[in-house]
Image (cartoon, rainbow, N blue to C red):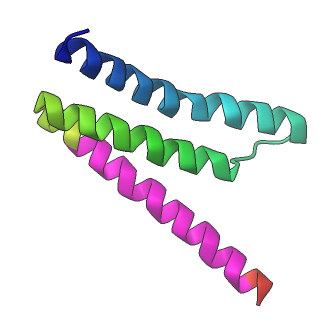
Amino acid sequence: MNSFNLWICFGFAGQLLFGSRFLIQWIVSERKKESFIPLAFWYLSIGGSAILLLYAIHRKDPVFILGQCAGFFIYLRNLSLIFKKNKVSVS
């Protein structure tokens, strides 16, 4: 397998990881019988976004890079807010 194919596989893996967050969110919401965003959603968002960002950098695509950078930091911020809220609740 050449380098091009490995990068394509890497990009698809990132897209699969990123897209799987919606499936997880849907399954959890169905089980709870209400709309709910589980913690796994944010971890999948960060993981998928990081892989897609690396793929975009490899492709030297500024539009894709900017979009993934923005999303990546938003997902990190959401996790930060969740942990901050949980820390306050426990105290």
Q: Nearer the viewer, residue 9 or 81?
A: 9
Q: Position of residue 28 (x, y in %)?
A: 79, 38
Q: Along the line of sight, which residue is nearer the eye, 61 or 36?
A: 61
Position in image of residue 49 (x %, y %): 39, 41
Within the image, what quadrant is residue 86 found in?
bottom right
Task: Residue 9 in the image: state x and y as whole percent.
Answer: 35, 18
Residue 76 counted in the magenta span? yes
Rendered position, 43 above or below 87: above
Q: Residue at x 42, y 56 (%)?
A: 74
Relative side of 18 to 49, left or right: right
| Viewer-nearest residue: 81 or 44 | 44
Numbered disc total: 0
Residue 1 magenta: no
Position above or below: 76 against 16: below
Residue 17 seen in the current view: yes
Give the magenta-colored segment's residue range.
66-88
Q: Quadrant of residue 73?
A: bottom left
Q: Quick one: which residue is furthest to the top in this view?
A: 1
Which quadrant of the view contains residue 88?
Answer: bottom right
Could you tell me what secondary structure mostly forms the magenta stretch? helix
Q: Residue at x 72, y 31 (%)?
A: 26
Most extreme residue toward the bottom, as rendered? 91
- Assign the N terminus to one quadrant of the image: top left
| Left or right for 5, reference 47 | left
| Residue at screen point 61% across, 44% down | 41
Q: Measured from the top left, where is residue 5 in percent x and y? A: 25, 12
Q: Residue at x 70, y 49 (%)?
A: 38
The C terminus sits in image quarter: bottom right
Residue 33 visible in the snapshot:
no
Left or right of 34? Residue 16 is left
Nearer to us in this view, 59 or 7 = 7
